[in-house]
């Protein structure tokens, strides 16, 4: 812990506890909703969707819904299961759940060595890019507007 003046300290915590993460997200969300002034934007939910073969996890996603948008934080498919349409099925399930939760869009990012073309093939639009991050690659920000006809 380091003093930064005026009686303040600054501290770095590795692997913060889930309770601290939840508290910080709630603080930011409450502040943001107060500034947006729309009670319809209060709903939020953090969830995972898992695909298993027996008891073995073979694909998964982490999603955070807020402001009627679903932040797809990650989508992973086991390397030996790729090419079997699992990613597409998982993404379609994510979109269906997002619509049921009232989301109007899904957004996230993918590095060039991951799967940005997978997302654009499924209707996602590149809305931003960080060039040469990580070195020699690009980071793509992707978004898909949802309708009741999606996915």
Image (cartoon, helix red, strand yellow):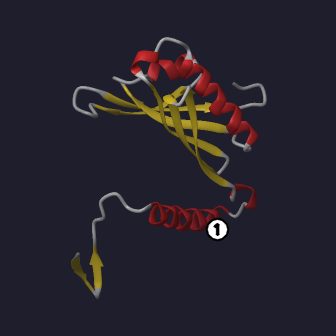
In the displayed structure, does residue 40 sit left or right of residue 76?
A: right
Q: Position of residue 47 (x, y in %)?
A: 59, 46
Q: Position of residue 151 (x, y in %)?
A: 69, 24
Q: Nearer the viewer, residue 45 or 86?
A: 86
Query: Label 1, on which residue?
Result: 34
Task: Examine the image and state in which quarter residue 139 appears.
Answer: top left
Please tell me whether residue 107 is drawn above or below residue 59 in the rendered image.
Answer: below
Mark 1, other Cα within 10 Å: few <14 / some 14–19 / many ≥20: few
Q: Position of residue 39 (x, y in %)?
A: 74, 61
Count of all numbered marks drawn on residues in the image: 1
Is residue 5 shown to the viewer in this render?
A: yes
Q: Nearer the viewer, residue 133 or 58?
A: 58
Q: Residue drawn at (41%, 62%), measured in percent from left and top?
A: 17
Kind of element beneath mark 1: helix
The quarter of the rendered structure image containing the N terminus is: bottom left
Please tell me whether residue 121 is drawn above or below residue 126 in the rendered image.
Answer: above
Task: Examine the image and state in which quarter residue 128 appears.
Answer: top left
In the displayed structure, does residue 28 sit left or right of residue 145?
A: left
């Amino acid at each position: 812990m380091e003093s930064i003046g005026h009686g303040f300290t600054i501290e770095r915590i590795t692997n913060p506890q889930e309770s601290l993460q939840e508290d910080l997200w709630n603080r930011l969300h409450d502040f943001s909703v107060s500034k947006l002034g729309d009670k319809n934007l209060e709903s939020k939910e953090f969830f995972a969707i898992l695909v298993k073969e027996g008891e073995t996890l073979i694909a998964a996603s982490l999603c955070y819904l807020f402001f009627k948008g679903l932040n797809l934080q990650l989508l992973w498919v086991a390397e030996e299961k790729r090419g079997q349409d699992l990613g597409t099925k998982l993404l379609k399930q994510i979109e269906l759940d997002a619509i049921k939760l009232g989301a109007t869009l899904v957004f996230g990012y993918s590095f060039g060595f991951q799967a940005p073309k997978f997302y654009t093939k499924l209707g996602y639009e590149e809305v931003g890019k960080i060039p040469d991050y990580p070195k020699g690659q690009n980071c793509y920000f992707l978004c898909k507007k949802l309708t009741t006809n999606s996915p």
